[in-house]
Image: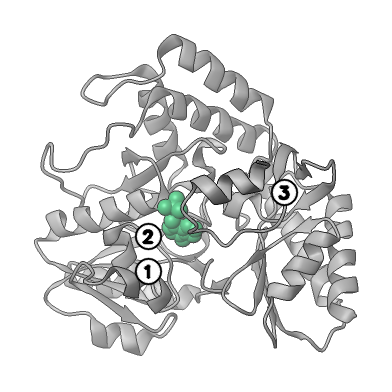
């Protein structure tokens, strides 16, 4: 059997698949098994911010695994300690404690639990079109019957309100509200950017009522939107949920917390959370982001890409939105067929909802590669 047949035979069919077999990656380029090259504008859904095949991260993983690959957090470890300190130094003010886990869903699960232990309240308010992962707790916060319905009954205590609508948020909070959980730019929900004033007002409501503000930056973190964390452009949260690109493609999640967060000892732990191999990968990744100036690159190349996209003349386009290298092209029709056509032209992009083409290229993408992406979009959408 070939690769596709093997996967189809031996894996549960839960992923909508694309009809290519990817075997290699370097920078912002991917190669399929037939030797066809693609410009990657998906970055494994925002994982590969530093690009594919980074040698510094590869070396860090290799060396750390030989030194000490795993070390359960009941024991101290110097690599984990250095990463915790590094994240605290990068994070917005007061977010100086970290809980390590292994994925975005796990980071949100933890934050929801920490909100309950820290406030003694139960209710979490999330947004329609929000996406926070698919494990049971995170799933309750994720919007969408297609995700939630097959797994009912869900964890109780979650309420959804329309995104970026202050009046609805004000009406929803109450005496039992533990936390508000939001994305600053809704990724899966269609690259929708909330207003700074909306988040600032929510910050005030939370402060006035003893409610915690959880910001999910699993997709927007680590330079994606043109600042190290998107919250630098919007609001300072009480908990900041991170994952995806944190460790350069090695699975890792984290919740950064301020001193309002209280969790009983032993109540929430993880076998792999903070393992030295992932921590070494994260330290190397953060160094790459800093030394290669990827945050600044995301800002300037993102602005350039947005400007070039706006020049595309096509009556299929409803709206183009973006921050840094996180961009969405909303069409007046279903975007799926165009995603397929772009792939045939050697450009890999993502969907975000039914009608939005989402671009999340590695932040190492070059201006020439961006020009090629714009040309392919022009040819595809103007045709
Ligand atoms: C904003 C956001 N939160 C959480 C998640 C879930 O992350 P994971 O798939 O690592 O569980 C995602 C994944 O796309 C995401 O975009």
Mark 2, secondary structure of its residue:
loop
Circle nearer the viewer, 2 or 1:
2
Q: Which numbered disc covers residue 134?
A: 2
Whether residue 231 is visible to the viewer of this picture, yes or no, is no
- Mark with earlier residue (2, 3): 2
Secondary structure beneath disc 3? Answer: helix
Image height of 301 relative to 1, above or below: below
Q: Is residue 257 above or below residue 230?
A: above
> What residue does disc 3 label?
297
Q: Residue at x 62, y 36 (%)?
A: 290
285 horizontally vs 66: left or right:
right
Residue 208 point in image, percent of width and height = 21, 72
Determine which residue is flagged by label 1: 142
Q: Nearer the viewer, residue 18 or 156?
A: 18
Q: Quadrant of ligand 1?
A: bottom left
The quadrant of the rendering that contains the C terminus is bottom right
Tell me if I can see residue 165 in this picture: yes
How far apart are labels 2 and 3 at the CA level? Answer: 32 Å
Q: Is label 2's Cβ within 8 Å of ligand 1?
A: yes
């Amino acid at each position: 059997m070939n690769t596709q047949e093997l996967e189809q035979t031996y894996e549960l069919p839960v992923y909508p698949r694309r009809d290519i077999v990817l075997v290699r990656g370097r920078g912002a380029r991917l190669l399929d098994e037939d030797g066809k090259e693609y410009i990657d504008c998906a970055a494994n859904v925002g994982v590969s911010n530093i690009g594919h095949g980074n040698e510094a991260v590869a070396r860090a993983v290799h060396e750390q695994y030989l030194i000490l690959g795993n070390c359960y957090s009941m024991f101290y470890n110097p690599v984990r300690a250095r990463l915790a300190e590094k994240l605290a130094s990068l994070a917005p003010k007061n977010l100086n404690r970290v809980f390590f886990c292994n994925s975005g869903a796990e980071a949100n699960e933890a934050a929801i639990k920490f909100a309950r232990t820290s406030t003694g309240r139960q209710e979490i308010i999330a947004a329609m079109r929000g996406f926070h992962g698919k494990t049971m707790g995170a799933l309750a916060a994720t919007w969408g019957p297609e995700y939630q319905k097959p797994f009912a009954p869900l964890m109780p205590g979650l309420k959804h309100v329309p995104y970026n609508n202050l009046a609805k948020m004000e009406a929803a909070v109450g005496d039992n509200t533990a936390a508000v959980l939001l994305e600053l730019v809704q990724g899966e929900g269609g690259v929708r950017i909330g207003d700074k004033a909306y988040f600032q007002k929510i910050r005030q409501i939370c402060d006035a009522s003893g409610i915690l503000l959880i910001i999910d930056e699993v997709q927007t973190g680590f330079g994606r939107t043109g600042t190290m964390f998107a919250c630098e452009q919007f609001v300072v949260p009480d908990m900041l949920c991170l994952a995806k690109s944190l460790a350069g493609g090695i699975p890792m999640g984290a919740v950064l917390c301020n001193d309002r967060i209280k969790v009983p000892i032993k109540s929430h732990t993880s076998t792999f959370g903070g393992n030295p191999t992932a921590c070494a990968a994260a330290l190397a990744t953060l160094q790459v982001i800093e030394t290669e100036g990827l945050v600044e690159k995301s800002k300037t190349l993102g602005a350039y890409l947005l400007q070039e996209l706006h020049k595309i003349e096509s009556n299929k386009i409803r709206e183009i939105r973006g921050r840094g290298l996180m961009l969405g092209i909303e069409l007046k029709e279903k975007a799926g067929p165009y995603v397929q056509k772009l792939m045939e032209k050697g450009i890999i992009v993502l969907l975000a909802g039914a009608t939005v083409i989402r671009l999340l290229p590695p932040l190492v993408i070059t201006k020439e590669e961006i020009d090629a992406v714009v040309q392919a979009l022009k040819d595809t959408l103007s045709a």
